[in-house]
Amino acid sequence: MKKRMKKLLKKIVGAALAGVMIFSAASLSFTARAAEKDVKTAVTDTAKVAVTKTLAVLLKGVLGAVNLPVLDNPSFVDEKDYKNTDFYEGSGDFVREAAAGNVWKLGSSWVSLVPDDYKTHNYYLGGFIMIENGFVNKVEDVADDMRARVIALDDNSGRGVSLFATVDCIGMTNNDIKEIRKLVAKTFAEKYPDVKLASVNVFSTHTHSGIDTEGLWTNTLPKALKNLMVRPFGGQMEQGTDKAFMDALFVKVAGAMEQAYLHMKPGSMTYAVKDIGAGYFSNKNRGQASDIDTKLTRLMFTPSDGSRPTVIVNLGAHPDVAGLPLNDGVNKGRTVSGDYIYYIGEYLNNCGYDFMFFNGAICGIYFGRGLTNDNQNMTYRWEQSRRYGYEIAKIALGMTKTKEEIMADPDLYDQALIDKETAEAEANGGGYTLWCENWEPVAETEVEPFFNVRLATVMVPVTNPLIQLAGKLNLANYTVIRSGLMQYKINVEIGYLEFGNQLKVCMVPGEMCADLIAGGASTTAEGSFSGKDFNAPVLKDIFGDVTVFGLANDAIGYIVPDNDYSMGLVFDHYQEILSLSRETASAVMNGFAAMAEKLG
């Protein structure tokens, strides 16, 4: 009898679950193609709005019907029992000027995360399961590398060292990041007991061609069905990600953090920012969102002993090209790559610099390759990523130089290569775009040696039934908090940094719509789907001019204005499919406002 019940349950719910998974994959497949073809959808008239609202109700109803009979994961906790652990509050009281004895100290390190057995063990890419690759994302090859890059930073004020790691991956949950923190804390307690850690932070580059670190892409349907079957009978549920791979990743990243600390040296830091123009970005899939953060922000740390400087780059664009499958028989989307970020690093490393990267507000923002493809002959998708990465690296190095200085620098300007590529572009019937044409340098300023760090937590409701289902089936490693019957939320980290008086940074735990930085069209009644204003402050209202480091200490999906949230606009608002709830943005923004109020 028990066996027959399991079979029947598997058939009924399995069929529904398969439909949900295929629908979600198809939606993301369309999204990727829309990004390629510059598809825009705008809902403007009353009839379409009515239809869209109806679709939203139907979609949520279907997802809710599939989700409803599935039991809660045993790891879910009641709100009264929840305890937040392995959390760092930051550097304590903020300072507003450098004190005597303050000096920048920075160390950097990196580690490869590609496992030795990638050809014999089944690993899966996180980011794309699409019809173009037959809904198969099993790793077949490695184009370049999947890395974790780390810096250790201190202002020598005695308020503590902060560690920052950026991982080439689709995203990492806060629970997994806490596993890294546990290892780091153990190492420092045993080896460096006198060292105070102000914060330990892990970011994701959001590359769509790294091995899955979220659990939503690793043999997903069979694993979900297995967990669905064993849960009612008390069986052991399998985690979404590859456990051995994640355990190794935790050890590697924690080890790289220790190495970065050991490599710390005193030196100076400079800051520069350049608007590189909309041509390097593609705003796709969200018709109402008006803002794109087209700035490239650079911090340059130069050690006092004359050793290799470290270039820290912040840019807001999806690294999604290398992993995108195409119907060309060549680009199957099954190749590990760090995408354009790897190639920024490769170029800078070859020029004598260490490299660190932080992605920005990337909701619906992809990297635009029109300026960098230059009508060259390229077979593989990663070749486009390389051209983009190399050009961004040149901009990062040359942003404070005049065009004459750039042309005199062999690292930035190679006339023979330019002539060759121009001839190739013309032979292909197109033109060649010189990256430093009509070039204007920007100013570089010295960053005063004081560093402020503050982190806080925010409770975010989880009302999206698809996200609830992923949690119930143990696919993603979140601690889901029950606040009532069928009422769920998660505890999310936010952060704020000040590099002297020169740069303010908000650390955001997901893919944030750029309109939430300064208040773009989708935060207004006139520009939003709902016809109402966003009911919370945006970052500029809270902190003034601020830069975003995205996917920081968590990966909660898309953060879109509450007033522009619609699950019915599937192909234009696909982000809602992978967003925790309509209230995500207001919860995060109100959390930042509360943080700022405490800072005074």
Image (cartoon, rainbow, N blue to C red):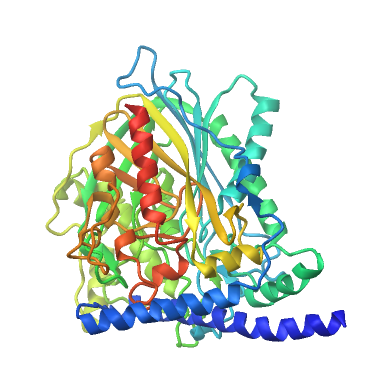
Residue in the foreground of this view, choosing between 178 and 36: 178
Q: Is residue 12 in view?
A: yes
Q: Residue at x 23, y 50 (%)?
A: 518
Residue 211 position in % (x across, y down): 58, 64
Check the picture and name the quadrant holding the C terminus: top left
- Quick one: which residue is furthest to the front in this view? 485
As drawn, is 160 to the left or to the right of 587?
Answer: right
Q: Nearer the viewer, residue 108 or 188?
A: 188
Q: Position of residue 504 (x, y in %)?
A: 31, 37
Residue furthest right in the image? 1
Q: Residue at x 18, y 46 (%)?
A: 405
Q: For the N terminus, which image quadrant?
A: bottom right
Tell me residue 101's x, y (percent): 39, 13
Quarter-wise, where is residue 186 in the image? top right
The image position of residue 44, as x and y in percent, is 20, 77
- Which residue is drawn at the image coordinates 67% and 82% (left, top)? 14
Q: Is residue 408 among what the camera can see? A: no
Establish if 426 lies above or below 212: below
508 or 152: nearer the eye?
508
Q: Is residue 284 above or below residue 84?
A: below
Identify the residue at the far top of this view: 100
